[in-house]
Amino acid sequence: MTPKQIVAELDKYIVGQAAAKKAVAVAIRNRWRRQQLPPELRRDVTPKNIILIGPTGVGKTEIARRLASLVGAPFIKVEATKFTEVGYVGRDVESIIRDLTEAGIGLVRAEMRVSVQAKAHDKVTERLLDLLVPLPKNSPWEPEQEKEELDRRQRTREKFRAKLEAGELEDRVVELSVEQKATPVQIFSNLGMENMDVDLQGMFDKMMPKNAQPRQLPVKDARKVLLEQETEALIDRTAVVEQAVERVENHGIVFLDEIDKVCGPSSGHGPDVSRQGVQRDLLPVVEGTTVNTKHGPVKTDHILFIAAGAFHVSKPADLMPELQGRFPIRVELTDLTKADFLRVLTEPKHALPKQYAELLKTEGVSLEFTPDGLEALADIAFDVNRTNQNIGARRLHTVIEKVVEEVSFDGPDLPDKRVVIDGPFVRARLGPVVQREDLTRFIL
């Protein structure tokens, strides 16, 4: 996708923040541009990591979430607050790359499943015919009799094939052998398990005997089981891992949220393992290192890192200078204005009013938001954000929920199934709460 196409897709779900969308779109496009370069030059072109700075609720995480669905690249979103310095209780930052590799393997496996789908369907049909028209028991037939029997069986098989394709045998019961998956045995606790490069569970799966049990299933259910078996058999696991690692190294994207929570001056007493320690451990991963995973070594030189933080208490300059240098592109996201709140309620593809209207439509209630009703919602959300804690667009969730609460509660029993939410309706519901300063703190 071109940068303009990426921004156009993001515009369907996120209001404003043009600078952030543009920076992200250019970074994504540069991944493709780099792949078109000659190999010797390609090695030296490193991604320009981005840091998104802005208050909560303005779209930082939503940009990342929508980006993941747009790009067919391995993507992972992590919170920086989950990690501690190596050697302490908690996750170490290298586990980010291990998780990214797993995401890449899942992505490639899903693509391969689609590519072998047609072949797997053909094999499933043949296996179902084997179950419906089983081979005859060995009998001391003469050669002529045996040939007649084989011809008869082939004719029967073709009749069954026609019926199977016509969907006439969906309820016919067949018996097939289904492998029972062993329950995973957890030998160690989760702490520190990501440091183990050996796939212990995989080893135990290979060592344990396969437990296959016969099951009586109708053809429609047997087809699903057989399709799963045949698809797995057709996928080359080694090729999946090789492709996934290559894709992670060249196209992987890590969204590192809450980066501002690991900012701040170094602790005056004792080890500061969850702040300065995490920053020190992030340095080599962002700069470029090799991380050992159970699928082999993965280089991080060309993985794109997008960091985000509100930076209410700290500021980007509080990050270690070395880490600041690893994020050369900085984009500030702006606070939402009253007009932005109105746009959030009307422009996105699945805006909140549309969601509530569709939810209540399932019970026959027609919920209609008038333009002045939407304006009142935007006004109140903006005012509450200004007078209390500013939580951005998330304020709209609680404001609308408060307005629609009674309708949602009485929905199934409403005599009049048409409800119009206009300006007076909104102010009648929210006016008393907004006016009383001591109560506004109870609205999220």
Image: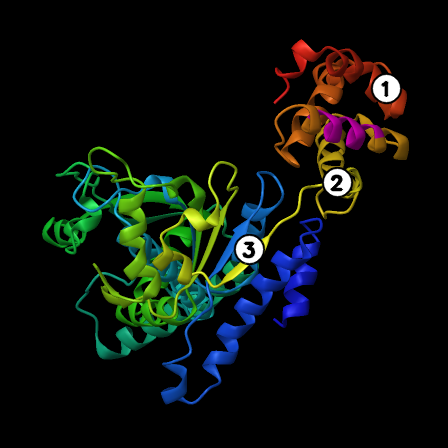
Tell me what residue is drawn at x 72 percent, y 47 percent.
Answer: 348
Q: Which mark is residue 199?
A: none
Q: Quadrant of residue 47?
A: bottom left
- Residue 70 visible in the snapshot: yes
Residue at the outermost left position = 207
Image quadrant holding the N terminus, namely bottom right
Image spot of residue 104 (x, y percent): 38, 61
Q: Nearer the viewer, mark 1 or mark 2?
A: 2
Which circle's residue, 3 or 2, is located before the other in the chain?
3
Left or right for 367, reference 44: right
Quickly name the residue at label 3.
167
Q: CA distance from mark 1 to mark 2?
A: 23 Å
Of the numbered discs 3 and 1, the one sitting upstream in the chain is 3
Residue behind mark 2 = 337
- Range shown magenta: 376-384
Q: Nearer the viewer, mark 3 or mark 1?
A: 1
